[in-house]
Amino acid sequence: MLARGTTLAPSFAHSLACKTELQNRLFTALSAMFGREVPLYDKALRVNMVCNTRVCALMSQLHIGFTIDQSDLERASGERHGAIRIGRADEYHWMGRLFACFAMEPHCFYDMTAIGAKSQPVIATAFRSRHRPEHRVFTSLLMTDYFDADTRARIETLLAQRETFSPRAKELIERSERDDGLSPDDAQALINECTQHIFKWTGRARDFALYNQLCAHGFKIAADIACFQSHHLNHLTPNTLCMDLYTAAIKHCLGEVDAHWFRARTMRALTALVARADHDFMKLHFKHVPLEEIALYRAGVVTNAQIAQCADELVAEFSLPEFALSELDHAGCKESTEGPSADTAIFLRQDAYKALTEPVQFTEADGAVIDATHTARFGEIEERGYACTPKGRAAYDACLAQTELLGAAPGTTDERMADEAESAAFEARYADEFAAFEKSLPGLIAQRFVYARYVATDAGIAAKERGAVDSIDLPTLIAQGFVAYEGLRYEDFLPVSAAGIFASNLNQYGTKSSAAEKPTYSQSQLEAVLGRRIIDATLIYAAMEAQSKLDTFTQLGVIEMLSDEECSQLQRVAASS
C-alpha cells in the first residue's frame, strides 16, 4: 500500500507535453494553415513583420541598450488571437474541452445580440490562459432562437446533420482530461486534428436556399455558421507595434493609396510613436524583457531626419514585387481603426483588410451541386494597451459614444486617393474625444483608470535592510527607485469593436431578431453549455494588482503601515479571482 502523499508515476507525468507550449505550437500550426488557405494573409504577415522590424530599429536608437533577436521579434509580431463561430451547443461544449488541453480557459461573457445597431445573433467567450496569455480565441455560439420559428427549425435541422469533432479528436481530448495532459505524440495528433479538421476551411456547404435567405435578410454570420459542413477559423490576428504604420502600409500594398500618401502617413505615425515610446511603452510591448533591464536603458535621440530616412526606406521596400498585394484578390481595408485613439494606450486597437470572396460548393439534399461564392474570412490586426478598471471602462464608453457623432472616417475610392491631411484632421478630432484620459501610464494610474503590477527592486530591498523605507505611497517609492511597475496589458475583447469589425467585413451594420419576441441571454446560459464557470477577467486584473501591492509592501517591510482596513481590502481583492 502506498504511503499517504505518495505520487503515482512521476515519470509518466514528466513525459506529458507542456500545455502552454502546446498552445504556442497550435497557433504556429494555425498560422501556417491559414496562410496556405489565404495567400493574402501570409503576405499581410510579412508586411507587419517589416513594420515591426522598423519600429524596433527606431526603439534601439531611442532606448540605448534595447536589442531584439529574430525569435523575440517573431514572438512580438505573432498571432495574438483567432476567432471561430460554432453552430450547436454540443459542438461548443467540445470546443471548451479542446481548449482546456492547451491551458486555455473561458474569460468574459460577450452578448453580441445586445449591442444596439451592431447586434449579431451570437453570444461568446474568449479562451485564453489565465496569466500572461499570449494567445486567445474568440469563440461564438449561434443562438437559433434569435430567429423566427421556421428559420430556426431549418437552421437546427441543417446543423444536426454535421459532425465537426472526429472520434479520434474526442478520444484525445478525453485522454488529456483523464491524464491531465498528453504525450508528445498524442499532443501532435490533437494539433493535427485542429489543422486538418476542427479549424480547417473546406468550402463545402449545404442548403443554398437557406444560405441565400439568411444573407438577404442580413444574417450573413448565421449563414457562415449554419450552412457549412464544419466550422472554420474565421480569422487570425497578429500583433503590430504601431497600428497606424501597419494600416498605412497595408493600404499602400493593396493599391488603395499611393507612395506619396504612404510616406506622409508614415512620417506622422512614426513621429507620434517616437514621442510617446517611453519606458512604459517598452514594458507593454516587449514582455520578454525584464523590468530591471528596461530601467537601465539610456535615453537616445531619434531625429526627424532619421524618421524621414526610415519612411523612404519603407517606401522603397514596399515597392518590391513581393509586396504587390494589389495583384491578389482583395476587397480593400476598413475605413478606420476600432478602439481608442492612437495616443490613448488602453484596451486594444483593431483594424482589418475586408473579408475575401471565396469559391464554395453547395451539395443539395437531392445531390445537386451548386458552385457559388462566400464572403466571411478577413485579415485582422491588433495593438493592445492597458487593462482598464471599471472606472476607466465607464470613461472609455462615454468617450466612444462621442466618437459616433464624428461620422465616417475619410475613405478611399478607385477614383480619388484619400487626402492624407484630411485623414490627419479626422484622427485629431477623434483623439480629442479621448481627452479625458491621461496619455502617460503614471497619469492613467493616478486617475485609477488602469491596473498595474508592482514589484520591489533590489535597491528597495537593500533600503529596507538599512531601515530606509518609511512610506507606503507607491509614487514616492517609485520615485525613490524602491519599486518598479508596469501596466497590466489588456488580454480580452471589446464587443463594440468586434461588432465594428464584423460590420465592415460583411458590408452590413447589424441585425434585428426575427423571433416573435426577442430573447435575452445570460452568462449562466453559456456556462451551462460549457459545463464550467466563465472567468471574470476584471477580477483577475484587480487581484494581480492587489497581490503585487501586498507582496511589495511585505518585501519592503512596510506592510504594517497599512491600516487593518486597507490590508483586509487588498487581501479580499487578491483572493477574489
Image (cartoon, grey):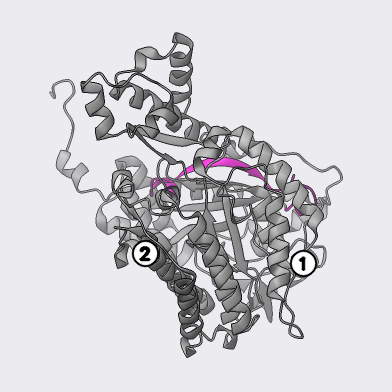
Disc 2 target residue: 61
Residue 135: percent from the left, percent from the top?
44, 53
Q: Is residue 292 above or below residue 237?
A: above
Residue 454: percent from the left, percent from the top?
39, 33
Q: Which mark is residue 215?
A: 1
Q: Earlier in the sequence, mark 2 or mark 1?
A: 2
Dot 2: what SS? helix
Residue 558: percent from the left, percent from the top?
34, 18
Q: Quadrant of residue 360?
A: bottom right
Q: Is residue 360 above or below residue 540?
A: below
Query: Counting other residues with Cα less than 10 Å from the Cα at mark 2, is it few (<14), some (14-19), or many (20 or more)?
Result: some
Q: Which residues are magenta?
A: 99-120
Q: Which mark is residue 76?
A: none
Q: Marks 2 and 1, Cα distance to the nearest angstrom?
A: 51 Å
Numbered marks: total: 2
Magenta-span inclusion, residue 402: no
